[in-house]
Image (cartoon, grey):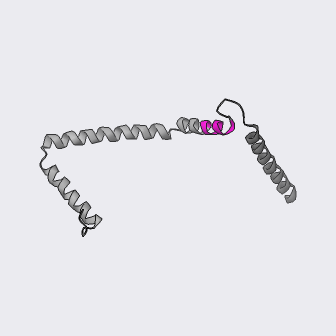
């Protein structure tokens, strides 16, 4: 890219060079590229499908929770368990108080 050339112009020229190179390909080469691209996309779609499958999402969430409550040696992190229990009890107390106030 020269000093006077904008990024858009450089991109346009690069695209034109790619198109010129593409024009030199034979139909068999183009078809082979299409097949290779299709296979790559199919593989990526399979990976994404596996990644977003409910069992995979549940497994990742279980691992995150376990990593939060269990240390690297397999022991429970009592300070985190206690903090979670305290928050749970506070929410329960607030819920009960609101429920009683409605009566």
Q: Nearer the viewer, residue 91 or 18?
A: 18
Residue 31 in the magenta stretch? The answer is no
The image shows residue 7, relative to residue 33, as above or below, that is below
Residue 85 point in image, percent of width and height: 78, 43
Q: Is residue 68 magenta?
A: yes
Location of the N terminus (image quadrant): bottom left
- Residue at image location 61% in from the left, 39% down from the top: 64
Q: How many marks?
A: 0
| Left or right: residue 30 compared with residue 86 | left
Image coordinates for residue 35, horizontal then vertical, percent: 24, 39
Q: Which residues are magenta?
A: 62-69
Between 67 and 94, the residue placed more toward the observer is 67
Query: In the image, is residue 8 above or below residue 57?
Result: below
Quadrant holding the C terminus: bottom right
In which image quadrant can residue 55 be found? top right
**44 left or right of 9 in image:** right
Image point 66% across, 29% down: which residue?
73
Task: Give residue 31's quadrant in the image.
Answer: top left
Quadrant location of residue 72?
top right
| Closest to the observer, 55 or 10 | 10
- Residue 51 lies, in percent from the top left, at 48, 39
User: Taking the image as drawn, is residue 103 in sight?
Assistant: no
Label the magenta part by its dominant secondary structure. Answer: helix
- 44 left or right, relative to 61: left
Q: Residue furthest bottom?
A: 4
């Amino acid at each position: 890219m020269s000093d006077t050339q904008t990024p858009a112009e450089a991109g346009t020229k690069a695209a034109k060079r790619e198109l010129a190179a593409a024009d030199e390909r034979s139909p068999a080469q183009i078809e082979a590229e299409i097949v290779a691209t299709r296979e790559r996309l199919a593989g990526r779609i399979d990976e994404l499908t596996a990644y977003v499958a409910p069992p995979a999402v549940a497994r990742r969430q279980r691992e995150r929770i376990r990593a939060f409550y269990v240390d690297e040696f397999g022991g429970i992190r009592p300070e985190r368990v206690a903090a979670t229990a305290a928050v749970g009890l506070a929410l329960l107390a607030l819920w009960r108080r609101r429920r009683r106030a409605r009566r």
